[in-house]
Image (cartoon, rainbow, N blue to C red):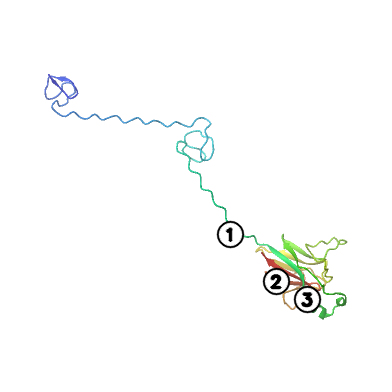
Amino acid sequence: MATCPQGHASADEEFCDVCGREIGGTQAAAVPDAPAVAEPDLPAAGAVCKVCGAELAGRFCEACGHDSMAPAPAPAAPVPPVPADRLPEATTWTATVTADRAYYDSVMAVDGPDAAGIAFPPYCPDRHFPLAGEQVSIGRQSRSRGIQPDIDLIGPPEDPGVSHLHAVLLAGEDGAWSIVDLDSANGTVVNDEPNPLRPNTPRPLAEGDRVYLGAWTLITLRRA
């Protein structure tokens, strides 16, 4: 009796009576079975996503799609703050009020009815008024008439040539300002223009423009 490579006893010495293999041939190497792949454990009840914190109902987060079986992503590096000297600056305007001797002299040269009683102030410190809102009124306070202008020129020193409600500054959409004379008694002059402004007519202003009113008041607009 012959024995085949699989160990079967066979009367046929060439081919196995049981499995049919060639008895004189080389035994084929056995192919090992593929190792079983373990199924990953699903997240436990009440588990939350490592990325967005949403409660998990399965392996993948329904909120952000993160695979709960994958490691959590590394936290993003903090963004350094922008240096203070590189931050964009908000545009602000300021009206600086002072006394101008040259304008006073030009007013006195006209020799108006009240010119003799108006003296140029010996001391007039600069006053600074930040401009905000849609309009800024200019004048002199009058409690009896209920007038309280935003830029109050009652002083000290007080310019008697300024009307109680003399003019108004209007904010434009581009951030610039315009001035409107409110039909004041003595008018409003811009820069070196020969004629006063037409009443109730806006006149655009640029940075550094000089607005003259009253007997000696000068208002200069500056942007910071």
- Tell me the SS state at disc 3: helix
- Tell me the SS state at disc 1: helix
**Residue matched to label 1:** 86
* Looking at the image, residue 16 lies above or below residue 163: above
Q: Alpha-carbon neighbours of circle 2 within 10 Å: few (<14), some, or many (≥20)?
A: some
At 70% from the left and 71% from the top, the residue drawn is 209
Residue 170 percent location from the top left of the image: 72, 64
* Looking at the image, residue 120 lies above or below residue 35: below
Total residue callouts: 3
Give left or right: position of 161 versus 56.
right
**Residue matched to label 3:** 101
Amino acid type at mark 3: Arg
Q: Mark 2 or mark 3, which has the lower sequence index?
A: 3
Amino acid type at mark 2: Asp
Amino acid type at mark 1: Arg
Q: Mark 2 or mark 1, which has the lower sequence index?
A: 1
